[in-house]
Amino acid sequence: MNHIEVCFSPDLIHLHELEGKIVVVVDIFRATSTMVAALANGVKEILPFADLESCRAMESKGFKIAGERNGHTAPGFELGNSPVAFLSGNYSGIRLAMTTTNGTQAIDKSQGAAEILIGAFPNLEATVAFIQAKGKDVLVHCAGWKGRFNLEDSLYAGALVKSLESTHLADEDGALAMKSLFEREGHQLKTYLSQASHAKRLQNHGIDADIDFCLTLDLYDLVVKVNEEGFLVQV
Amino acid sequence: MNHIEVCFSPDLIHLHELEGKIVVVVDIFRATSTMVAALANGVKEILPFADLESCRAMESKGFKIAGERNGHTAPGFELGNSPVAFLSGNYSGIRLAMTTTNGTQAIDKSQGAAEILIGAFPNLEATVAFIQAKGKDVLVHCAGWKGRFNLEDSLYAGALVKSLESTHLADEDGALAMKSLFEREGHQLKTYLSQASHAKRLQNHGIDADIDFCLTLDLYDLVVKVNEEGFLVQV
């Protein structure tokens, strides 16, 4: 058996060993859901940035730019952090530069892993199948909210632990706890997560369609990884 | 309604507001359980130290000294971190200086709260009654294991959230998640926690009696707080 563990915050990732592991970065509301939606709908590759300025500068290099801070599109950016935005319109073949409040920072801090994947509910089963074919230990890296634990990323972690239970032993405390949590609440994701602080934050912004999308399972048979040049691409 | 939230690691406590809140520090295996056991069995007061040297120096000032690192009694210390040690022997009226791997650090980092309580399963209901009489917001500060999430402190957090649900709203993600976890696993604490990494670590040390003690509910009608001089005392 391989092993699976969960880190609840980029501020705690230094306490985990990354070497040799598949790290699955997850920021359900909404960065990693948006990345999966973008690549599933024609975007060729995504370059993640931790800061706004570096991201904005990519516009002059032929990239479309997406920037979000605190749930809103950042000033001067064409796109924000809405997955639903990629479901219509023509994004075929474009290159996207993207920065978000939490998600892109978590990708940045996952350097050193054998492989970095981007996890979201819409591509959960595809990610599970990819991991099981690889046979490596897994670390779920939850982006959280400004360093704090959040419910939606943690529940995704629980869903992944549960889905991998035939191949990956959950013998680490975070993985054990999230497996139990998902077993209890996973049948009613949308209802349960409507209590989550970030869902409330997003509801206040009037983006229910995004929330629905982010909590929909297995829309795409698509695995997203960070390649050697740091681009997010389809495997 | 008041509110309750959970912080899973002393390394994340800076992300939480402490002012005006009752902070309940919890390190189930074993620091806060031992503190409760000591005060319930005659110890007059406990002075917590983050480092071994300052703690050891208290021996010359008439204190008994208790020091633990990585689950073992630290060299040169009379007592380690075993609650069961306080159930026999005569500790009546003694003053205790104590340092542990995780628990005393969490107390140290809780400065700034309106009140700091020491939480453990053996005094859960007494702590609940005290909090409900005060009518303040609550933050559960889990000591974790060297900065990482752990199962036993988190489950205590869940138990406290659940016990306070008539007076304290769990509208923060950590509190919500731990309430669900406790609802699922709280009926079988010992079985469930036997999977936890720190319980395994302690079992390897041959201290099953400590684990049993730490997971026993409501042995004592005792509330433990940090007083203005930094001593742990009965309320």
Image (tube, coloured by chain):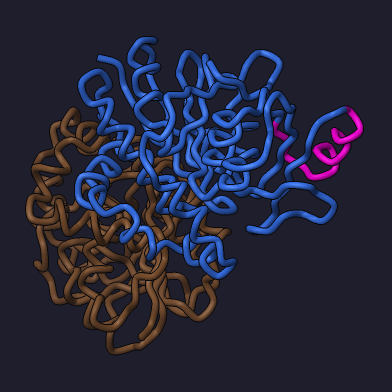
Chain colours: A brown, B blue
Q: Position of residue B7 (x, y in %)?
A: 44, 38
Q: Count all numbered tags in the image, as a single digit.
A: 0
Which residue appears at 14% of the width and 51% of the height? A185
The reply to whether residue A125 is in sight is yes
Which residue appears at 54% of the width and 33% of the height? B36
Between B28 and A224, the one lying in front of the other is B28
> Quick check: B200 left or right of B167?
right
Q: Which residues are magenta?
A: B48-61
The reply to whether residue A38 is in sight is no
In the rendered image, the residue lying farthest to the right is B60
Q: Position of residue A132 (x, y in %)?
A: 28, 85
> Quick check: B68 left or right of B168?
right
Q: Quadrant of the N terminus of chain A?
A: bottom left
Between B117 and A141, the one lying in front of the other is B117
Q: Quadrant of the C terminus of chain A?
A: bottom left
In the picture shown, does residue B80 fall above or below A230? above
Q: Position of residue B228 (x, y in %)?
A: 66, 13
> Quick check: B181 left or right of A139?
left
Q: Is residue B52 magenta?
A: yes
Q: Quadrant of residue B21?
A: top left
Q: Position of residue A205 (x, y in %)?
A: 19, 31
Which residue appears at 28% of the width and 65% of the height? A119
In the rendered image, the residue lying farthest to the top is B134
- Most common secondary structure along the magenta stretch: helix
> Quick check: B16 left or right of A178?
right
Q: Quadrant of residue B201?
A: bottom right
Which residue appears at 24% of the width and 32% of the height? A201
